[in-house]
Amino acid sequence: MSDVVACAETVLVEALPGTGLNELGVRRVVHDLLASAVPDSDEGGSSVRSAIVIPVRYDGADLSSAADAAGCSTDRLVLAHTHLTWTVQFMGFAPGFGYLVPEDGSDPSLTAVFNGLPRREESRPRVPAGSVAVAAGYSAVYPRVSPGGWHLLGVTDTVLWDSTAAPPSVLSAGARVRFVRAEEVIG
């Protein structure tokens, strides 16, 4: 195999021609990966995989309009965003851009806030690096300046992509993320 790319509902497996990779071989690799995966919790129910904590200043350009579209107050939107543990479902769009979904078993009243929130009607040609955003049940942090059509809730100083670091991306598929109010971290 030359590469494996996890997506929202599929997995792309690339192989060099002539390597003899077939469906049975892919199934064996997936089975072995699942068998060796780190469990989400120990026998007592406490989390084994710690979450990446991302401090956020919730002052985004779309905070009020996103709350209105979700049918709640800005305080409720921020509370839902910070009280969920998010999981990187897959990476894409730009280097270091993780598509985060609420962790399995999350409080349905919190996840509902984001499930009905579509993308913005118009995309922005320039979203600043570090912008924390939501759309269509996902959350994300823009790792660098780029176009984007998600609702901007706030901004973080956490650098998610550094091409000189090893690994260059802070996030990876399966990573757990917690957003916290920046003022709670500082003071």
Image (cartoon, helix red, strand yellow):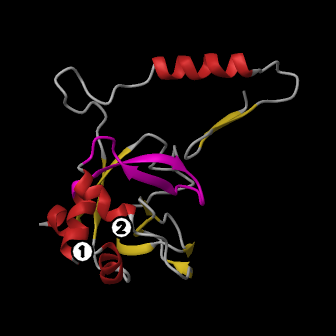
The residue at the point 34 percent across, 25 percent down is 39
Residue 157 image label: 2
Residue 51 image offset from top left, x and y in percent:
30, 44
Residue 45 in the figure: left or right of residue 146: left
Residue 120 image offset from top left, x and y in percent:
49, 77
Residue 2 image offset from top left, x and y in percent:
73, 31
Amino acid type, residue under disc 1 in the picture: Cys
The span picked out in magenta is 83-106
Number of residues whose C-alpha sits closer than 10 Å to that of mark 1, classed few (under 14), some (14–19) or many (20 or more): few
Q: CA distance from mark 1 to mark 2?
A: 27 Å
| Quarter holding residue 132 | bottom left
The residue at the point 17 percent across, 65 percent down is 186
Looking at the rendered structure, the secondary structure element under dot 1 is: loop
Number of residues whose C-alpha sits closer than 10 Å to that of mark 2, classed few (under 14), some (14–19) or many (20 or more): few
**Residue underneath mark 1:** 72
Q: Quadrant of the C terminus?
A: bottom left
The residue at the point 45 percent across, 63 percent down is 136
Amino acid type, residue under disc 2 in the picture: Asp
Residue 126 in the figure: left or right of residue 181: right
Q: Extreme right residue here?
A: 18
| Quarter holding residue 122 | bottom right
Magenta-drawn stretch contains 85? yes
